[in-house]
Image (cartoon, grey):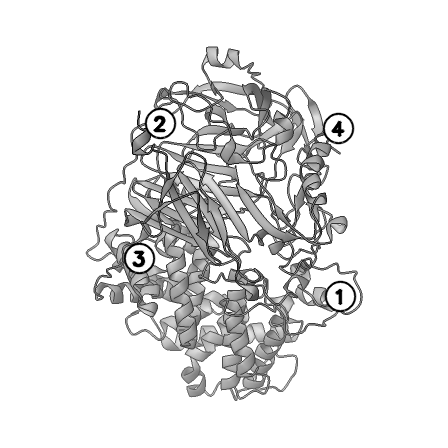
Amino acid sequence: MPNSNGHGDWYRRTVLGIISSAAVPAVFSGIGGADAPQNQLDRAPRKPMKGGSNALDSINFGNPGSESRHDLRVGTSETVRGKEGRSARRLLPLNAPEHQLGSMSFTLRCDSEYRTYLTLKFKSNPDNFKRLFLFDGTEMIGYMEPGVGWPSLDMGSQPGSFGAISTHGEFWYATHRLPGYLTEDSDEVELRIVSWDGEQPSQNIYRAYTHTDPYLQPPANDKRGGQFELGPIRDVSAESQIEPVVEQIDELVREGQQKSTISPRGALGLAMAAQRDWIDAVDTDAVFETVRKTVDDWAIRQAKSAPHEVVHRGWEEHGRFARSITLLWEDFEEHDAFRQKLEGHPAGEITRRDAYVQFFGEGLDWRSKSRREVTNQIMFVTIALVRMNSVLKKLDSDRTRSQETVDRWIDEAIGLTSLTVTDDETLPVSQFYESFASWSDYDPEADGEVKYMPWFESGSYHTVSEKGLAKEPDHVAHYGELALSLIVKLYHETGLERVHERAIEASQARAPFRLLVNDAETGNRWAAAEGTVGVRNVEHPGMAGHLRGYGFKPLFHALKLGDPVSVRFGKLAIDHNVAGSMNQWWFDVWGVGSLERWIHRVEGYRAVQEMDDSSYRTPMHRDRFAWADEDLGTVSITDGSNRVFANLGYGGATNLHDWGVNSMARIHHHNPDVDRVLNIDLTRAEFPTTGATWSRPNQLLFSGEFMDVKMTEEERTRRLPDDGEVVIDQAMAGEPVPQASSPGSEPWPLADDDDEYDPIDYYKRTPDPRVGMGIHYRECRYGPYLIGMNSSGAPERGFGEGSAYELELPDGVSTATDLMTGETVSGESVPVPPRSTRILKLDHRKPKDRQD
């Protein structure tokens, strides 16, 4: 185990002393994180600027004089000339057997009293993007998951992992907190940067800074290239940008209807195509035969085994087949297919109708026992359940669920009511595991009857925030846009007005988290979903592929919802000439199964072209805009040319993230001059607690069966320059992270399982996400911005009865601009009512009677 140097005791002194001194139950004010040595960041010393910079110290990599002054140990690094001839270093693998790590180390000044931050300068979208980590000797400081309180130095960004690579400038800066034990009682700190992937050179590292004010102001000699400018609009050679999509649809239909059987996605795509007279390639009889044979095959295979043995995960397959039959119902009846015998079925003499009733009835029974727990999965499963129930009604089956049950599924999926997850609360664990195989959260050896998914026992967990953002369980980019599209699809297929209203709310909530970027390959301007303040699929500066920045399926949304926000983003996709863009990924992965997407694209495009333009202006096109979500702690600011995105409490979402309140904010700030992503301390985090804590595990990677994630001691054994073969331990192991409780000071479900937690255990029981996300009052100061958020006032969502609190203005500031209202506020503090956020831009000018 690590902590031989005693920093484990330092953690315990810092946070446990605070908690133990409070009465239990307590309200813990976690200022600056569990390991922060200071009490008030607002009072952090403002060091005198040198060369226009507020940095404590800096090293210019590749500059011999600078490197010598900071005791650079080269390790496996080499000097390179990077962007625009600027000097940098990159880490190389050792010329030795497998499991080699690249490394270099250096010293920088720090502050022994106040939090010291480390900022690294990187090139945007490097050729080699390999994980870089901060080490303390041979111990890793942080974890490999992107959505945690201590991530990799590159923020876990995976540019291009979900399509096109975007850019917002030549360089970007990554700012991280340094653990308090590194800088306690010292004015200098030795830092080691390690490249985990030892097969290729790392990306270039240009500079490193230390500073106490999170808002670093680099010196004038830190050249960042010219100001960022948006590129030209994509050039489209076709007469209509949608015609290539129509041609692709014809090609996919010809391919699919020639097959004997096809995938569930393909079956639905063909069934949809058969309903459109504008698709010339459709052969209705061929489509019917392909779909019928496919469903027959699945029904026979399931009858010989069980639902979970014929599907992958089982979120959608039955539902896609059910929707296919519903669309082709008249064809099945015209061919008298339902009364025909289904040859090869293990039941022997059985009609196709009865075989289909068995197939969908078993699927409905099985899938309703676990409707999953994060938004995109719940939505997929719910749509499938609604489709199965609908086709069973058409088949005159008595295996359907009541309308009351279906309504409950829908309302839970879209976040109108709290989540129950399962319709069978007393299923034995062993049976649950047998039914859901590798998708269980339970030990297959467990006995007895228990309620599964117990972190929903509270009756107050909602899968979508009150304002409409998806919870996975924290904020996400890709899956956030996907969840919006799934709510729209659910409305499209049910016609329910409450779903329509919820989809519009989701569309409005997604809009603040989009930004304009350039495509890194073509230089064309695109809209991207902000990709750094979410905890899954982190991508800097944003996700531009698959039209995510326009809403994933913006034209379909505009067609179905018709609200000003959706129409504007649909129009924007057409204005940017991206409506006809088709990423090869869709054809490589889904093939004929991508038909649904393209059909919706064409019909949406044709409809939006005829719509009047919306008067709505997107947040990325305004001079001033501010918005916040009090459930997730997310914030979006437009202030002139500055865009600021924030997640106040980033990564405290359990599962593969932190299992407690880490008191950290993730911020993405960009303007034409600079692009930066920061992990900084919250200046206030208040939440109810019993005094419980979660200890960070001695692991590099949190275990999780769902994504087949694990890392044993053998896999942590690596070779480091100057150290040879070592087992890489976790420097943060043992850090106690305080856990929030319910407003009534009862532990959230499974919050007290810390002693049972085994980070290598695939079947670990995951606590309610609100052990980390249940913060009632939170504040963050970054540069000129002061944010105060009050999440209380929603007992039905686990945030208790509401009470206002006062957001204090920092010393020396008497006035500020409220960016939500545009009004000027003054005084020593401003009130923050329940379920609201104040976003202030501080005025540091002296009053007129004090001007020098």
Residues tagged 4 and 3 counted as in contact (Cβ below 8 A): no
The residue that disc 4 covers is 4
The residue that appears at 60% across and 51% down in the rendered structure is: 687
The residue that disc 2 covers is 224
Q: Amino acid at mark 2?
A: Arg
- For disc 2, the neighbor class at 10 Å (few under 14, some 14 to 19, many from 20) is many
Q: Amino acid at mark 3?
A: Phe
To which quarter of the image does residue 598 belong? bottom left
Q: Amino acid at mark 4?
A: Ser
> In the image, which disc is placed on residue 569?
3
The residue that appears at 63% across and 27% down in the rendered structure is: 182
The residue that appears at 75% across and 69% down in the rendered structure is: 428
Work out whether mark 4 precedes mark 3 in sequence or the reverse, and give the earlier one: 4
Query: Which residue is the extreme one toward the front?
Result: 849
Give the CA separation, mark 2 to mark 3.
32 Å
Q: Residue 45: x, y in percent?
A: 50, 27
Secondary structure type for disc 3: helix
Q: Residue 82: x, y in percent?
A: 40, 23
To which quarter of the image does residue 551 belong? bottom left
Closer to viewer: mark 3 or mark 1: 3
Q: Residue 338: x, y in percent?
A: 51, 86
Residues tagged 4 and 1 counted as in contact (Cβ below 8 A): no
Secondary structure type for disc 4: loop
Residues tagged 4 and 2 counted as in contact (Cβ below 8 A): no
Work out whether mark 3 precedes mark 1 in sequence or the reverse, and give the earlier one: 1
> In the image, which disc is placed on residue 430?
1
Work out whether mark 1 precedes mark 2 in sequence or the reverse, and give the earlier one: 2
Residues tagged 2 and 3 counted as in contact (Cβ below 8 A): no
Work out whether mark 4 precedes mark 1 in sequence or the reverse, and give the earlier one: 4
Q: Nearer the viewer, residue 310 or 633?
A: 633
